Amino acid sequence: MLVYTVKKEDGGLLLRTLLRERLGLSRRALTDLKAKENGILLNGKQVTVRAVLQENDCIVLHTEDTREDVNEAILPLPLPVSVLYEDEDICLCEKPSGMPTHPSHLHRQDTLANALRYYYRNRPFVFRAITRLDRETDGIVLLALHKAAAHTLSRSLQGGEIQKEYLALVHGALEGEGRIEKKIRRAEKSVIFRRVCEENEEGDEALTLYQSLGTRGGVSLVRVFPITGRTHQIRVHMASIGHPLLGDGLYGLRADAFPRTALHAARLSFPHPRTKEPLSFRSPLPDDMRQVAETLGFSQEELSAFCKV
């Protein structure tokens, strides 16, 4: 349930205008609320969105999910997950490596969806992941806790307002900063493998920025900023410039000692879906990547400083 008190500067606005322009509700979210009994209340009464607002009016939006909304096929299971932040609109959690984000044919009881269904087991919970990570990638995932927040955050994602930063360990000596702007497409005869496009070949536009934090023992620690969000984008782009990620058996060499793709979702910044307040969250480098970096010669002080940049 969202409660909003009309401010002086909002007096005279139509309720519809405030909900769309001030609170950022999408047309679909507004339609959903209008269809729900008592979905939108003004001073305790159900009204149309053409109502004219006055200062100190109280608007209540019943955005919460019901039991009918819940996907009972996603079982609530006590799996390891750390919640960084939560309020009535959003949840940010840290997904461990090895845990898929969504259930699939081969993964029905070991996913982030199962873990959060258990975490929110005392309320109707619908799993709405706004950002997603590959199974081997660990780090921050953003979820919407109701339809209105999901619609707003999805628009923010499409509009480039959600900024992501990853930390990666890559093969080779990579120096300075760089920009990788290469189209990506699905490889022929594969539902998983992606590749960069040849010149004049059709594909999805993809842009990745990176900044090397240093090289030790033939391995570089890199900050990576995917501007677009294509499947396997970081892995494909880094491999395309000759610096595949450690442990990436799909686009690099699984022969190295690292047991998984060395990629960590380290930072997520975005405007709050209701208040529009800019938020930013960080997740420290996981133990397995930190241990490799320390073995290669990065000091604890360096790694701590890099994770705070």
Image (cartoon, grey):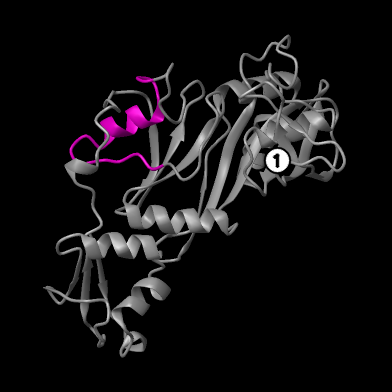
Amino acid carrying label 1: it is Arg
User: Does residue 74 belong to the magenta stretch?
Assistant: no
Work out whether 210 lies above or below 246.
Answer: below
Q: Which residue is rendered at x = 24% and y = 65% of the image?
A: 34
Q: Which residues are magenta?
A: 108-128
14 with respect to 307 (left or right): left
Residue 106 position in % (x across, y down)? 44, 16
Label 1 sits on residue: 223
For image coordinates 62% across by 35% down, the residue present is 231
Find numbered disc 1 in the image and state the secondary structure of the residue it sits on: strand
Give how far across and how far down residue 167 sits, in percent.
Answer: 65, 36
User: Can you give x and y, in whole percent of width and height, for residue 146 in the image?
Assistant: 31, 51
Residue 274: tell me if it is visible: no
**Viewer-proximal residue, 154 or 4?**
154
Q: Quadrant of residue 3?
A: bottom left
Q: Reply above or below: 303 against 98.
A: below
Q: Picture quarter containing residue 32?
A: bottom left
Residue nearer the viewer, 267 or 194:
194
Residue at image coords 65%, 30%: 300
Check the picture and name the quadrant holding the N terminus: bottom left
Q: Is residue 125 left or right of 293 when viewed as pictured? A: left
| Viewer-proximal residue among 14 and 95 | 14
Across and down, in percent, residue 5 comes to: 26, 76
Q: Residue at x 39, y 72 (%)?
A: 20
